[in-house]
Amino acid sequence: MTPFSLLDGAVQGVRWGQGRKVLALHGLLDNALSFAALAEHLPGIEVWAIDLPGHGESADLPVTDGQFVLAWLPRLGQVIDELDWPETVILGHSLGAMLGQLLAAVDPRVELLLCLDGLGPMASSREDNFQRFEQLYQQRGRVMPTRYYGSFEQIVQSRQRGQFPLSPQAANRLAQRAIGQTHAGWFHRYDRRLRQPSLWRLSEPEILYWLAKIPVSVELLVFMIDSWPGFSERQAAIARLNTTLMPGSHHLHMEAPEAVADWLLARLL
């Protein structure tokens, strides 16, 4: 594992292996180490995993209340600018998959998308957008408090009990790049705005429009999102989509990396 730094230190990451280069984008509140176990089973592939803005060791996006998914794209475009590879292949999990899809719609340098359990961002109606923005406006300037834990073991256990539970091994691996410690105790190190409601979300028709603009092949490996509302319609929107079902946990690439690696190698080599 070799660390690297981009954009004058604003983006940090780690890379593994040698061979065909792949830019890896992790899921929400994860970090670059979410691809560590997977990379061990990818001979002939050079995985460049970044910490997304506000995650791991990367800098936050510019200060604002809430997040807007399209605001991430310019930073990712700058990453591609600096890497300056002859081809850009993106491997994304969950949020990373969604960002890769949106990026491919507007950046012709993206030649292949490998997506793990992610198909387009969360949608909202105009009514929901208004209500959420109104709430953010009323709470403007407030910062979510930091929760502290009494030991390293306790903070690792908190990731095991999250919305998408992790095994002890996977939670411990992520923690190596995602926690800090002060006199008050151990804490999760991420941009607290990531836990706020989104500043604004695209509507479902807008998401379908963006997905229809993707010109490249999209290889989608589904662990559990096929049960989510609108999944079939989003599948139909992408012209060059191949979907494979591999039922399991949302972090199956961390829990069963060999099977996911076999799927990837069949599409990369």
Image (tube, rainbow, N blue to C red):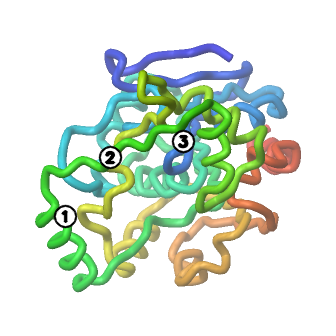
Q: Which residue is mark 2?
A: 145
What separation in Å lies between label 3 and label 2 (alpha carbons)? 27 Å
Residue type beneath disc 2:
Pro
Question: Which class describes the residues within 10 Å of circle 3: few (<14), some (14-19), or many (20+)?
Answer: many
Residue found 34% across the figure and 24% down from its top: 10
Question: Which class describes the residues within 10 Å of circle 2: few (<14), some (14-19), or many (20+)?
Answer: few
Judge depth for marks 1 and 2 and give the one in front.
2
Residue 56, image x and y in percent? Answer: 48, 31
Residue nearer the viewer, 9 or 263: 9
Q: Earlier in the sequence, mark 3 or mark 1?
A: 3
Judge depth for marks 3 and 2 and give the one in front.
2
Label 1, secondary structure: give it. Answer: helix
Residue 35, image x and y in percent? Answer: 67, 36
Q: Which residue is mark 3?
A: 25
Residue type beneath disc 1:
Leu
Q: Is residue 84 visible?
A: no
Residue 209, image x and y in percent? Answer: 38, 73
Q: Is residue 186 visible?
A: yes
Q: Is residue 181 above or below residue 134?
A: above
Horizontal placement of 181 versus 175: left or right? left
Horizontal placement of 97 versus 168: left or right? left
Residue 244, image x and y in percent? Answer: 77, 65
Q: Earlier in the sequence, mark 1 or mark 2?
A: 1
Label 2, secondary structure: give it. Answer: loop
What separation in Å lies between label 3 and label 1 (alpha carbons)? 27 Å
Q: Which residue is mark 1?
A: 136
Say which quarter of the image contains residue 111: top right
Q: Earlier in the sequence, mark 3 or mark 2?
A: 3
Residue found 60% across the figure and 51% down from its top: 93
